[in-house]
Image (spheres, rainbow, N blue to C red):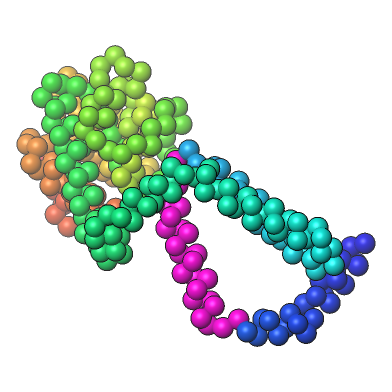
Amino acid sequence: MFENLLNFYSNFLNNQEFVKSSATFTLQDIIQVLILFLFLIYVYWKFIRNTQAEKLVRGILLFVIVAWIFSAVLIALNFQILGQFAQYLLTGILLSLVIVFQPELRRLLVHLGQTKFVAKNFFNFKQNNKEQKTNIVKEITEAVKYCSRVKRGALMVIQKTDDQSFYNEVGTVINANISAELILTIFFPNTPLHDGAMIIHNDKILAAGVLLPLTEDPKLSWRYGTRHRAAIGASEISDSACIIVSEETGDISIAIDGILRKYEDITTFKDDLEKILANDNSEKIENVFLTNFLKLRKKQ
């Protein structure tokens, strides 16, 4: 049976009509398929990703592909009735998706109806990214400033890559946009998540209440508590930057590459945080930022 199936596919590929149809597949066809593919990826990334419909879309996509292949095989085997029925059934299912995904389609139409849609989404990537980074810096700075003023302990890990290998998976998945209000709520005293670390990657708070590995540096002063030791430990074995607010003193610090820097004013902290986020894709913090860390390390 397996040999017969291989013979069928061999004959199918050598069929003259198939070769003739393949020869008509021009560069314009490739460009059209590519444009359609990019459009579908954009719709998925913008309106479906991280929504309740994401798993449903994946399941439907897999079903559509399998059903389409199955119907094509039936028609090729001269089971015309069954093949045509499978295609009609598939068409009906695709039309019914308009009802299933009504909320997502509504979001798409509203987004398309916005003014300057093309300029904002296709010609302004760098500007949007810059505005996003500025907003993240603002939200984190406001939260850190308030925590410092009221002496509320906080520990935030800013990841350059989504790497979970260095921290314990004990924690709660958040996957929410960064805001000062959410950060302050998570670190509110006596709540289940306030003692652990918050993991930040790109423009999202991924998790909270996460346990980090403590540093094993024997030269570290006994004055540093668990938060500082966890921040230094995480920064020693990853490319993350860890922000710490002391619960006892309200002091603000950042740990990078096992080096801890304490900040006397919020303006300097904000400037360095901007440099951290601006260097997301680099291997090390460069120039003045790293130099300042090394100078402070020598003084300790």
Question: At which x and y percent is residue 111?
Answer: 33, 52
Depicted 257 relative to depicted 167: above or below = below
Question: At which x and y percent is residue 69?
Answer: 71, 61
Q: Main secondary structure of the magenta part?
A: helix
Q: Nearer the viewer, residue 70 or 99?
A: 99
Q: Nearer the viewer, residue 68 or 253?
A: 68
Give the left or right position of residue 31, taking residue 273 as reference: right
Outermost residue on the top side: it is 190
Instruction: Give the residue at x 32% y 32%.
Output: 198
Depicted 74 relative to depicted 64: above or below = below
Give the left or right position of residue 17, taking residue 48 as reference: right
Instruction: Give the residue at x 37% y 42%.
Output: 237
Question: At which x and y percent is residue 117?
Answer: 28, 59
- Whether residue 200 is visible, yes or no, is no
Quadrant location of residue 16? bottom right
Span shown in magenta:
25-51
Instruction: Give the residue at x 42% y 52%.
Output: 45
Q: Is residue 275 magenta?
A: no
Instruction: Give the residue at x 9% y 37%.
Output: 266
Count of marks placed on residues: 0
Give the left or right position of residue 170, taking residue 296 as reference: right
